[in-house]
């Protein structure tokens, strides 16, 4: 007995677009990790070279340099970990799992918040630089050299990536909330057909009479 085959559901275009945005963000995170580690060594060297002309002691210079390395390493680790996370969410969205869509919304909310905080920090550093007391003049001089130690394109690149990151998360969250995405994640898989009980080929076949309980006389 044959059964008609049901056509597999087609992925919505909004889901494909959201997946493409997540994959692009994952690639950008990996690229940022590599660039961050490459720029770090040159930045520390530039900072140490400029710090020699200040009144800071070698211990103070080493402390700020260690802080600079730790900050860059932390940014690289966060970017490196976010890349497989975004790629995994993209693959989960293609499979149509509702739980993955909820997890993607959570990640988008956290990522949007992180992007806004990064932009606020960058703007705040430019608008109101850190001011220390007269007894911490050396530390103030060293912190003022940190931004100059980076390449001229580094801070605008970070600002652009933070804005792009926030917009990317916002676009993904919006696309997954559209009705077309609801139809994709709310679909039901066709049940597996069951073979009904096959009746006997001869339902009215005669049966042999039962033997009598007592032998005939």
Image (cartoon, rainbow, N blue to C red):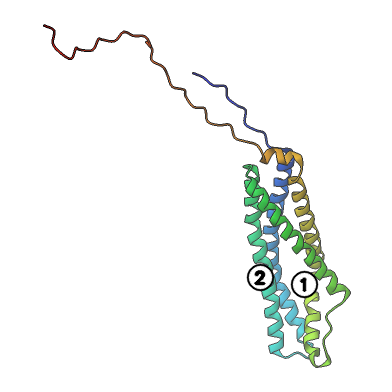
Tell me where residue 40 appears, x and y as whole percent: 70, 71
Residue 158 image point, x, y percent: 78, 64
Picture coordinates of residue 4, whole percent (x, y): 57, 22
Q: Secondary structure at mark 1?
A: loop
Answer with left or right where residue 190 lies relative to residue 37: left
- In this view of the protein, can residue 46 be seen by the observer? yes
Q: How far from the left and from the top, in percent, is residue 132?
A: 82, 86
Residue 29 marker: none
Q: Nearer the viewer, residue 15 or 40?
A: 15
Residue under circle 2? 73
Between 112 and 59, which is closer to the camera in this rendering? 112
| Distance from Cα at disc 2 to Cα at disc 1 | 15 Å
Q: Residue furthest top?
A: 217
Which residue is depicted at the point 80% across and 75% down? 147
What residue is drawn where x is 76% and y is 45%?
A: 175
**Residue located 29% across and 10% down the image:** 207
């Amino acid at each position: 007995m044959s059964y008609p085959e049901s056509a597999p559901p087609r992925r919505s275009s909004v889901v494909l677009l959201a997946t493409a945005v997540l994959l692009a963000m994952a690639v950008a995170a990996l690229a940022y990790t590599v660039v961050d580690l490459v720029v770090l060594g040159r930045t520390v060297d530039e900072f140490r070279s400029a710090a020699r002309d200040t009144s800071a002691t070698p211990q103070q210079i080493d402390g700020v340099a260690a802080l600079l390395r730790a900050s860059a390493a932390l940014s690289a680790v966060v970017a490196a970990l976010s890349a497989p996370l975004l790629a995994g969410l993209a693959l989960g969205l293609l499979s149509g799992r509702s739980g993955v869509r909820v997890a993607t919304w959570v990640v988008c909310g956290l990522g949007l918040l992180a992007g806004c905080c990064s932009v606020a920090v960058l703007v705040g550093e430019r608008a109101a630089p850190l001011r220390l007391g007269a007894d911490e003049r050396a530390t103030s001089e060293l912190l003022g050299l940190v931004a100059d130690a980076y390449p001229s394109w580094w801070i605008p690149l970070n600002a652009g990536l933070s804005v792009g990151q926030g917009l990317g998360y916002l676009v993904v969250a919006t696309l997954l909330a559209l009705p077309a995405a609801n139809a994709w994640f709310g679909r039901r898989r066709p049940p597996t057909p069951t073979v009904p009980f096959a009746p006997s080929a001869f339902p009215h076949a005669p049966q042999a009479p039962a033997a009598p309980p007592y032998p005939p006389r």
